[in-house]
């Protein structure tokens, strides 16, 4: 019997790459977005789901359960980008980012876990970010939202282990996607104290995304994880330097690491 996979945020970027790749690997895939467009050429079905709306989530999960009677794999991928100085970022935008990137996956889990628990079987992969391992300047809210999901996953993993439900994180680095198009950018205040550093950081971020690898790399890693009998907790996918930055944070003195980051961002 084919495994049934639910992937949030599958209309583009990493989510779509995962959905396409797992469809090729003979999984039955359901992707989601807030307002899916009919695309007859896709090898998977798109379902309407807003991770900020529990009723929308329950309706989507109910639809899949009615059709398939199970959800074997949940991949929490839906997320939003956000940049800006911590002081100048509107709290309404902070709340929106946390609502999508952190509370969103928790809402989806509340709808899906009862079905996995009933079958005493399931896999959950939360898509976080290498940025979630460190507080990056002018990306602090994004780092915090992804870091929170990393930590929450560790707790879920221990709590659900006896139910044969396995949790893992996959933290991508920079990949060539359209995330920048939907990212909230706090405006650069030309007369403010953060103008120079923030403008420089925005340029770096856009360059990293434009030069990023194919998101299929993330999809291939997830396919490997789903084959593992006892999957690990944390996986990183990205360039050597991006992954090595996490290692450096563990081994370098804190101020030395901070100095390295500041130099990288021209601060």
Image (cartoon, grey):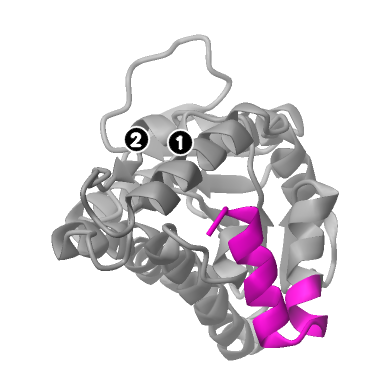
In this view, the residue in front, 209 or 128, is 209
| Point 48% across, 43% down: residue | 200
Left or right of 248: which side holds 167?
left
Quadrant hosting residue 124:
bottom right
Quadrant hosting residue 161:
bottom right
Q: Is residue 80 visible?
A: no
| Point 23% across, 59% down: residue | 89
Quadrant hosting residue 114:
bottom left
| Point 72% across, 70% down: residue | 234
Please tell me whether residue 68 is drawn above or below residue 146 in the rendered image.
Answer: above
Please tell me whether residue 185 is drawn above or below residue 131 in the rendered image.
Answer: above
Left or right of 78: which side holds 136?
right
Q: Point out residue 266 in the picture as x, y percentages from the top left corner.
A: 57, 53
Circles 1, 2 touching at the beta carbon (< 8 Å): yes
Question: What is the quadrant of the N terminus in the image?
Answer: top right
Residue 180: within the magenta? no
Left or right of 264: which side holds 84?
left
Left or right of 81: which side holds 200?
right
Counting other residues with Cα less than 10 Å from the Cα at mark 2, is it few (<14), some (14-19), or many (20 or more)?
few
In this view, the residue in front, 254 or 25, is 254
Quick one: SS at disc 1? helix
According to the picture, the residue beneath numbered tag 1 turns out to be 179
According to the picture, the residue beneath numbered tag 2 turns out to be 182
For the record, the magenta segment spans 248-267
Q: Point out residue 68 in the picture as x, y percentages from the top left corner.
A: 49, 45
Which label belongs to residue 41?
A: none
Counting other residues with Cα less than 10 Å from the Cα at mark 1, is it few (<14), some (14-19), or many (20 or more)?
some
| Point 48% across, 52% down: residue | 69
Q: Point out residue 121 in the picture as x, y percentages from the top left corner.
A: 64, 70
In this view, the residue in front, 243 or 50, is 243
């Amino acid at each position: 019997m084919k495994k049934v996979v639910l992937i949030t945020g599958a209309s583009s970027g990493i989510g779509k790459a995962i959905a396409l790749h797992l469809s090729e690997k003979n999984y039955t895939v359901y992707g989601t977005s807030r307002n899916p467009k009919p695309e007859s050429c896709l090898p998977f079905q798109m379902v309407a789901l807003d991770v900020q709306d529990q009723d929308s989530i329950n309706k989507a999960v109910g639809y899949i359960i009615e059709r398939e009677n199970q959800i074997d794999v949940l991949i929490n991928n839906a997320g939003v980008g956000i940049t800006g100085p911590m002081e100048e970022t509107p709290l309404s935008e902070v709340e929106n980012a946390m609502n999508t990137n952190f509370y969103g996956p928790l809402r989806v889990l509340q709808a899906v876990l009862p079905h996995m628990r009933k079958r005493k079987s399931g896999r959950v992969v939360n898509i976080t970010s290498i940025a979630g391992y460190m507080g990056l300047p002018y990306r602090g809210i994004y780092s915090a939202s992804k870091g929170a999901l990393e930590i929450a996953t560790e707790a879920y993993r221990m709590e659900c282990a006896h139910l044969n439900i396995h949790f893992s994180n996959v933290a991508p680095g920079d990949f060539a996607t359209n995330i920048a198009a939907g990212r909230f950018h706090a405006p650069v205040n030309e007369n403010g104290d953060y103008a120079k550093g923030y403008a420089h950081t925005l340029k770096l971020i856009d360059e990293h995304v434009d030069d990023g690898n194919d998101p299929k790399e993330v999809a291939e890693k997830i396919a490997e994880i789903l084959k593992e009998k006892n999957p690990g907790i944390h996986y990183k996918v990205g360039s050597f330097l991006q992954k090595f930055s996490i290692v450096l944070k563990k081994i370098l003195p804190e101020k030395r690491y901070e100095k390295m980051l500041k130099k990288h961002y021209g601060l």
